[in-house]
Image (cartoon, rainbow, N blue to C red):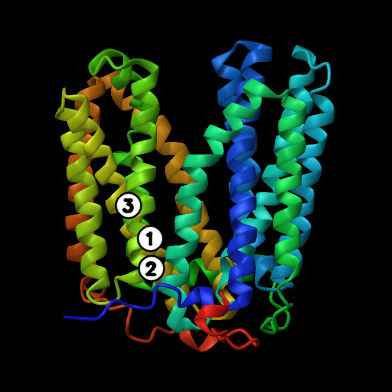
Amino acid sequence: MTAPADAAAALRFPEFRALLLSSTFSSLASRMLAVAIGYQVYELTRSPLALGLLGLVEAIPALGLALIGGHYADRLDRRAILLVTRLVFAACALGLALASRGADAGTVTLLYVLVFVAGVARGFGDPASSAFETRIVPASAFVNASAWLGSVGQATGIIGPALGGLLLATWSATGTYVLIAGLTLTAWAALWRIAPKPQPAPPERESMAESIRGGLRFVRRDPVILGSMALDLFAVLFGGVVALLPVFASDILGVGPRGLGLLLAAPAVGALLVMLWATRHPPLRNSGRTLLLGVAGFGVSIIVFALSRDFAVSLVALFFTGVFDGVNMVIRKAILRLRTPDHLRGRVAAVSLVFIGSSNELGALESGVAASALGTVRSVWAGGVVTLLVVALVAWRVPALRSLHLGEAGPGDEGARPSPTPPPAPRQF
């Protein structure tokens, strides 16, 4: 029996602790902002279309600029990019606070403009963030670091919306945005504590278009990376159910808004618990097989949820969608970090972000279209079946993924170096 791994492997590096703190406050601010701006826009317009446009205004620059952001993440100081983009996000939050004083329906255009600017910051900041993380810990701690960063993302996904809603109910929108700006500046200060990292020299006379094509070409030529991205894309695209949960809560399970809140929280709770478990039991052996089984488990859980008419069973099924997706996220992130050379990490991260962002945006659209054409229940279980078929196809077409072990060295390991600061003894943490 294999002994449990060191759950604090990544935490023993002071700079990773600073990065984790920065990620916590930054993610919390983003989650709170999503709730605050959505609620405010709807209060000002009373229009569901306005909410749809809000998501589009943020997604277009974030996804449209991701590949360009990946190019610059492999050319410029990634830490500097993060510091600048987080300052821009904080400035947008303060701008929202000022715009919200005496806001009326005419203010919505200004709110959209500020959200668009925040989306631009995301387009450049997200690829740099993913690539920068690999410079903080050695390759041996990549999986543990992914588990901790994923745990923070899931925890803030639970706490952030609840806190944002509570603050909106007790404070004004202006006060909420000021706090969001303060959290972002705290994230900026934690990031500032991390020393600049040496950047690989880019090829001479390589244009931006050639650079972006280089990242796309690397992903296309690595079957493991491409297969893992395809699994994520199609599982979320066809197996996603979040957009239809209000229908289940209201018309199928009859549990109302309180039940809807629990249904929305269940996947995040499952993912958080399994990611914390992964800090001590990293999925290093048979990682590819675990990824395939995890996506298949996600599809089965979706089918069970679709067919259930009992609230408790539905809640447990959604909990397990989070459990399986949490395992999958840890493995997918570790695959990117371990198999990508450092000089390509920004561009490969950008390709992954486009895959994930597209699947989220298109998945919500697909859910609505399929539910209208097939009926809500049938569209959801059919999506689970399609997810299982995608798993079978990837397992057949990508044998390298079936036999993958993350414990073995990958081509990206040579780009990872430990932090120049030696790890402290456990009692000093």
Q: Is residue 310 above or below residue 196?
A: above
Q: Label 1's element? A: helix
- Mark before the other along the chain sequence, 3 or 2: 2
**How far apart are the two marked residues, 1 and 3, measured between alpha carbons?**
13 Å
Q: Nearer the viewer, residue 227 or 252?
A: 252
Residue at 38% in and 60% down? 276
The part of the image, by quadrant, that contains residue 255 is top left
> What residue is disc 3 on?
325
Q: Position of residue 236 (x, y in %)?
A: 35, 44
> What residue is disc 1 on?
276
Q: Is residue 221 above or below residue 138?
A: above
Disc 1 marks which amino acid?
Leu
Q: Label 3's element? A: helix
Residue mark closest to the camera, 3 vs 2 = 2
> What residue is disc 2 on?
279
10 Å neighbourhood of mark 3: few (<14), some, or many (≥20)?
many
10 Å neighbourhood of mark 1: few (<14), some, or many (≥20)?
many
